[in-house]
Amino acid sequence: MAASSSVTLSQALLSRSLPNHGSKTHPNHPSLFTPTTSTTPTTKFLKSVALRPARKIPSRRRMAVCAAAVETLEKTDTELLEKSVNTIRFLAIDAVEKANSGHPGLPMGCAPMGHILFDEVMRYNPKNPYWFNRDRFVLSAGHGCMLQYALLHLAGYDSVKEEDLKSFRQWGSRTPGHPENFETTGVEVTTGPLGQGIANAVGLALAERHLAARFNKPGLEIVDHYTYVIVGDGCQMEGIANEACSLAGHWGLGKLIAFYDDNHISIDGDTEIAFTESVDKRFEALGWHVIWVKNGNTGYDDIRSAIKEAKAVKDKPTMIKVTTTIGYGSPNKANSYSVHGSALGAKEVDATRKNLAWSFEPFHIPEDVRKHWSRHVPEGAALEADWNALFAEYEKLYKEEAADFQTISTGELPASWEKALPTYTPESPADATRNLSQQCLNALAKVLPGFLGGSADLASSNMTLLKMYGDFQKATPEERNLRFGVREHGMGAICNGIALHSPGLIPYCATFFVFTDYMRAAIRISALSLAGVIYVMTHDSIGLGEDGPTHQPIEHLASFRAMPNILMLRPADGNETAGAYKIAILNRKTPSILALSRQKLPQLAGTSTEGVEKGGYVISDNSSGNKPDLILIGTGSELEIAAKAGEELRKAGKTVRVVSFVCWELFDQQSDAYKESVLPAAVSARVSIEAGSTFGWEKLVGPKGKAIGIDRFGASAPAGRIYKEYGISVEAVVEAAKTVLS
Amino acid sequence: MAASSSVTLSQALLSRSLPNHGSKTHPNHPSLFTPTTSTTPTTKFLKSVALRPARKIPSRRRMAVCAAAVETLEKTDTELLEKSVNTIRFLAIDAVEKANSGHPGLPMGCAPMGHILFDEVMRYNPKNPYWFNRDRFVLSAGHGCMLQYALLHLAGYDSVKEEDLKSFRQWGSRTPGHPENFETTGVEVTTGPLGQGIANAVGLALAERHLAARFNKPGLEIVDHYTYVIVGDGCQMEGIANEACSLAGHWGLGKLIAFYDDNHISIDGDTEIAFTESVDKRFEALGWHVIWVKNGNTGYDDIRSAIKEAKAVKDKPTMIKVTTTIGYGSPNKANSYSVHGSALGAKEVDATRKNLAWSFEPFHIPEDVRKHWSRHVPEGAALEADWNALFAEYEKLYKEEAADFQTISTGELPASWEKALPTYTPESPADATRNLSQQCLNALAKVLPGFLGGSADLASSNMTLLKMYGDFQKATPEERNLRFGVREHGMGAICNGIALHSPGLIPYCATFFVFTDYMRAAIRISALSLAGVIYVMTHDSIGLGEDGPTHQPIEHLASFRAMPNILMLRPADGNETAGAYKIAILNRKTPSILALSRQKLPQLAGTSTEGVEKGGYVISDNSSGNKPDLILIGTGSELEIAAKAGEELRKAGKTVRVVSFVCWELFDQQSDAYKESVLPAAVSARVSIEAGSTFGWEKLVGPKGKAIGIDRFGASAPAGRIYKEYGISVEAVVEAAKTVLS
C-alpha cells in the first residue's frame, strides 16, 4: 500500500520534468538568468510524508534502504540474463543503425556489466529519477550512451520510451549523441568529453560521503548510496581522470565503484600504439582497490563477485577492470576500431543477429525480458517509500538536521539568506576583492547548509578557507573545506558532480584566473549541464605583478563572455563582490565565474548589489536628461580608474557618466529601455578601460569610442609599474576621452 | 686552439640574441607575423666549419661529445661543492629578498641537485646557448626560477649577469618571475604553469630520439644529448604530467631524466592534505625507472650515483625522487609552506646566513666558487668545437642527410617548399577541409624535413596521418606519425617542447576543435613562448552533427581571437586551407590554429592563398568604386552561404561584396588603405555569418550591421537539420541583408 501510494506521488512529482524536454522548440538552456529557488519537487513530498503517522518499516525493506549495509545482488537465471544482455546489445545496434551514426561497440561489450548493475545491483526509482537516495550511475565513456538509454528504457524510466530509442541522435529527441542530464531524466551528468564522467563520479561520491557524515544517525542512515561509473581506455588516458582518481583514493571514497571497460581498442586502433602503461598498478598507486574480471563478456558471476568484493572494501574506491570485447557478437567487426564509432551496416547487423541467435525485429524486446525488468517500477517505488518513512522518523527526532537536509535535497534556499552578505560604504577600508570574497564565502557558509568548496592548492592566495569549518578529509568527511591539490581540471569536474548530486549543494572552487585554461573543459560542462558551480578566480589581471605573463590573464574575460550560459562577473569592490555572490547563489542552473583582484581596491561611491544584478549600471553622473558628454566604462579593478578619470574630466567642465560593467551577460538580459538609460544610443563618446583583451568591447564603445585594454601578454614586474607601462591609467582614459570628444 | 676559435665564433653568433631582451621597450612579442626564415645562426657557422680541413678528434673529446656513451660525472671536492651549493642558495635568497617577491624554498632545497647537474653532468656552451647538441634542462617547477638563474649565472651565460640577478622580477629585466625562453637565453622553454615543463621535456627528449634515429651514423652520433627536468609536488598532481609521462614511458625515452623534488610541501601546506598517492609506484606503472635519493640535502654521492644509474637504463625514462627540505638552511622556515612563495625577511635571512655559516654580502660569489665554475666557458666551447668537427666529418660522408639536418637545426626552410602545396579550382570536387588539410600535411611532409605530428587518438577523424611514414614508436623512432592517445593537454605541451628543441622542427597536433578546451593552457604557452606549433582542429562547428553539444565548438573561435600572438585560421575550401598552411609554416614564432570542417564544402570561386595572407579579402563583388550596397562576410564553412546569399541578392539588383575573413589577426596587420579597400567605412550595411559565437563581430559589422551566429550551445542531430534550426542559412543572410539595407 505504501508502495502504490508512493508510485502515485512520484508520478505526480514528475510533472516537473526537465524545462524543455520533448517540446517542439529544441531542448536548450535558460535564456534568462533567473533565480531558481524551487528546483526539485521533493520538499512538498517530504512534508506530506512527514505528516503521515510513523509506521514500522519491515526489516527487509529497511535493510534494502541501507545500501551499504547489505548484500544487494539478486541473480537472474542465466538464460534469461543472456537474453536481457542481448536485448541491450541489439537496442544499441538497432538505434545506431537507424540513426546511421553512433557507437555500437561499447554497448555490445559492456551489456553484461550494464545488465548486472541496473537489474541486480542498483537502487533507483524509475518513476522518480530524482529520488534523493538513488544509486548514481555515470557513463564516463559517454559515446556508448545507447547502453545507458537501453538500460533506462528497460528499467522503466519514462524519459526513454521506444520512440526515443528510435529517434536516437535526431533533432529534438531525448536520446542525444552523448548522455546529457538536461535532455534525459535519469542521466545524472553530461559526459562525452573523455575523463569528465569519472571526475563527476568522484564529486557524486564525495557528496554522498559528506552528507552521510553530516546527517546520518545510528539506525537512520538517510544518506546511503553508491556511485557507479563505467570508464573506457580513453578516459583512462586523460589527465583529468588521474587527478580526480588520485583525490578519490586520498579521500578514501569507498562507495565509488568504477568499471574499467578494458577492451584494448580506441579510435586509432589497438591501445598498444599509445597506451601501454599498467592501469592496475597506477590505480593501486592512487590508493584504489583493484579487481580484474578477465572475462567481461560472459563472466557474469565474476562481475557479481567483483561488485561484492568492491562493496566490502569500505575505505578505498574500487576499480574493477573488466576485460571485454568491443562489439562483442559481431562476427567480423568485434575487437576492432571499426565497431567503435560507426553503424555496423545492414550486412554485419544480420551477421551479428545470426551469430547471437537473435531472431527478433529491430527494437523488439522479448516479452520475458520486459516482464523480468518490469519489477523495477514497483520495487523502486517501494524503495523510495521506505526511505520516505525512514526520513519521516528522522525528521521527528532531528528537526534541525532534517531542515538543513531538506534545504540541500530540494535546493530551496533558506529565508533571507542574502542578508548575511556584507555591505560596505566608501569609508570602509580598501581591500583586495579576493579578501572581500572571503568575507562573502564565510558569511554564506553560515546560512547555506549546502555551501562547500575549496581551492587547487591556493587557498591562502585565493582566500577561500571557511574559517568555521575544518578540512573534508578521509577522517573528517563532515567538514566543508575541500583541498583539491594542484588539480584544476579534476576540481572543476568534481564540483560539477557535487552540484548535480543535490539541488542545494552549492560548490565553489578556486585557482588563479589564468588557470581557468587548465579547467576550461570542465567549466564548459558546468555551463552546458546547468551546474551552478561558483568559480572563485583570483589574481585576475596584470595586477598580480611579479609572477609575470604565465600567471597574468589577458584574454580570459573575453573567452568566457563568448561562452553560452555562464556568468562572467568582475566586481570592483566590496558591494559588487557581495552582489556577485548573490547572483552566483541565485543562479543554480548557470555557473558563475568571479574574477577577483590580488591588489587592494578602494570601496567606491555608487556601487551596489542592485547594480550588479543589472550587469551594467551607472555609478556616477553629473549630466541630466540622459545626455552626458561622455560615458566611461570600467570593470573590476579598473572601475576605480574610470571613476577617477571621470572626476578629472568633470573638473574640466564635462558632463561624464561612469558605468560599471560587472557582468555583460546580465546586462544583455535587461530591457531595451534600461539599456538605453545606461548607454544612450545618442552618446557615442565612450571610453572603456579593462586590464584585459579589448576583444568584444567594440559592442559597448561603438565605432567612435575607444577601448583601453591589453592586447599582448603581460610582464613580470611590480603591478604598479606594469599598469603604468601598459597604459592602464587615469591619464590614458583622460587622453582617450579628449580624442573621442574632439 | 680549436676551442678558442670556437669561442670567438660563438660570441659573434650571439649578436643575434633575443628580439627585445634588454631593450628599453618592454620585452615582448612580435607584433607582426612575419615569416622568419633564419632563426638561428648555426648554418653559417656549420658551413664555415665544414670548410676547414678534417682533423683528428682527440679520443677524450670525442667521447665527451657522445654524451650517452660515457660516464660524465666529474666530482668536485666536498667543501668547495658545499660552498657552491650555498652560493646558489644565497643568490636565490638575496634576489628574492631584494625583489621582496619570489620563491626561495625550491632553490634552497634543490641547490645540491642543481649544482651537480650544471657543474658535473650537463654539457652545454654558455657562450652559445643554442649549440645544437647541448643537454636540455627544464625547470618544470618554474616558480623556483632563481635556481636556474643562479646556475646560468655561475656557468657563465651572458643572459644572467649580476645586475640581472639584482633586478629579479623587475620591469625589463632578463630574470622574470618564472623561466621564460623568450626573455632569458639559456632557458629552453617557458614554465610556471605547473606540469607544462615536464611535458615540454618529454617533447625535447622525443625530438632528440627522433633526430638521433634519423641522422646518427655509426661513429658519427651528431644527435646525442640528455633532457633533464626538475618537477615538484605540484607538477606531479597535474593531469598533464601524467599524460606526458605515460607517453614517455610508452615511447621508452631513456635519455629523459626527471628529478622529483619530493619536499612534502605545497602552497597549502603539507602534501598530506591532498597528495598521498604513491608517486614512485605510479611512475613504475607508467613504465619509468624509479630511483629514490633519500637525502637530497647533502647526499651528493647518492644524487651522482642515481644519475649514473639513470643513464645506464636506456630503454626507459628515469624518475629520481629526491627527498629534500624546502627552504633548507632556514632555521625557522625550512620545511614549511611559508618558505615556498615569499621572501624570508631580513631577520630570517640573517638567521639562515648564521645557520649555514655564510658570512658574505648579498649577491657575493666567493672567488674559489667563481673560479671553479669558470671552466665551463672554455669547456663548453671545446664541446661545441668538437661537435662541429664531428659534424664536418658527417657532412662529408652524408651530404643529403647533413642538408636535411641543417634545415632542422637552423630553421631555414628549403627553397620553394611552398610550391608543394596543392591548388584547386572551382571545378575541383567538394571536400571537407579536414580532408583538404590531409592533402596539405602530406605535401608538406615531403618537402619539410622537420615536419612531424599526429593526433590525440583521432587520426582517422582529424585526417592527420602522413601516408609515407610509419608511427613514431619505441622501435621505430625515426618515423613521423605521433600517436598521442587521448591526451590533448600533454600533446600540446609535448609539441611545444618539439618546436623549441630545434628551429626547423615543425610539429602539428590534432583533435576536435572543441577539445582545445582540454589543452588551452598548452596552446597559450605556445603563443607566449613563440613556439610555432600547428594546431589542426577539425569538426569545427555544429556541422559535425550527431555527436551533439559536448562536441560542438561555439565560443572557441572568439576565445582564440582574443588570445595574443596566435593565428586563428578558419579556411573555407582547398585554396584557403593551403593558404592557411603556408601561413602556419612561415610563422615559426607564432602558433596557428586551423579550424576545419567535418562536412564537405565546395571549392569557391575567388578564394586564394594570397587572400589568406591578408586575413580578410574580397572573393566576389559586382560593385564599382568601392561602394557596394552591402558587404557579406563569412568564414570557413559559412563562406559558401555568404557567397550564395550574395548571388541571390545580386539577382535582386543589389551590388554585393562577399568577403572571406579567414584570419582576423592577419587582417589587423594590414595597412589602413588595404582595410578600407575591403571594408570601406562608408558601407555600413554589413552582414556576417559564422557558425559560432557572435562575440566580437560587432567590430566588423558595426552598429548598423548584423552578425549571424550561434550564441547558445549546439544540439545532437544531423548537421543539415541543426544548421536549419539554428538559422545558419542563405535565407537568414538574405533576410538580414534586407533589414540592414532598409
Image (cartoon, coloured by chain):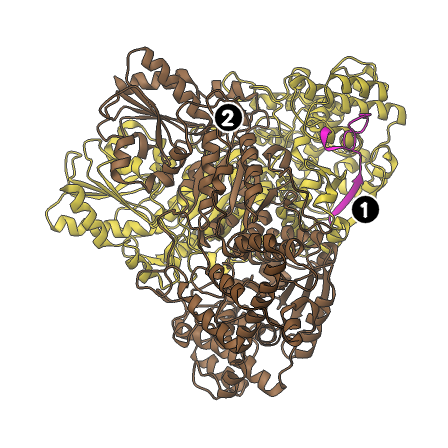
Chain colours: A brown, B yellow
Q: Are marks 2 and 1 on the same chain?
A: yes
Amino acid at the residue labelled 1:
Ile
> Which region is colored magenta?
B317-339
Query: Mark 2 is on which residue type?
Result: Asn
Q: Is residue B510 left or right of residue A112?
A: left
- According to the picture, the residue beneath numbered tag 2 turns out to be B28
* Residue sitting farthest toward the left: B653
Q: Quadrant of residue A735?
A: top left
Q: Chain of mark 2?
A: B
Residue A297 x %, y %: 62, 77
Residue B91, image x and y in percent?
73, 21
Q: Residue at x 61, y 21 (%)?
A: B12
On residue B87, which mark appears? Answer: none
What is the crowding at mark 2: few (fewer than 14 residues within 10 Å), some, or many (at least 20)?
Answer: some
Label 1: how many residues lie within 10 Å, few (<14), some (14-19) or many (20+)? some
Please name the residue that numbered disc 1 is placed on.
Answer: B291
Say whether residue B56 is magenta: no
Task: Tell me residue A442's x, y (percent).
Answer: 58, 37
Q: Give the chain of mark 1.
A: B
Residue farthest to the front, as pictured: A53
Q: Is residue A722 above or below residue A581?
A: above
Observer-nearest residue: A731 or B497? A731
Against A242, residue B181 (above or below) is: above
Q: Write the residue at 62% across / 29% down.
A: B178
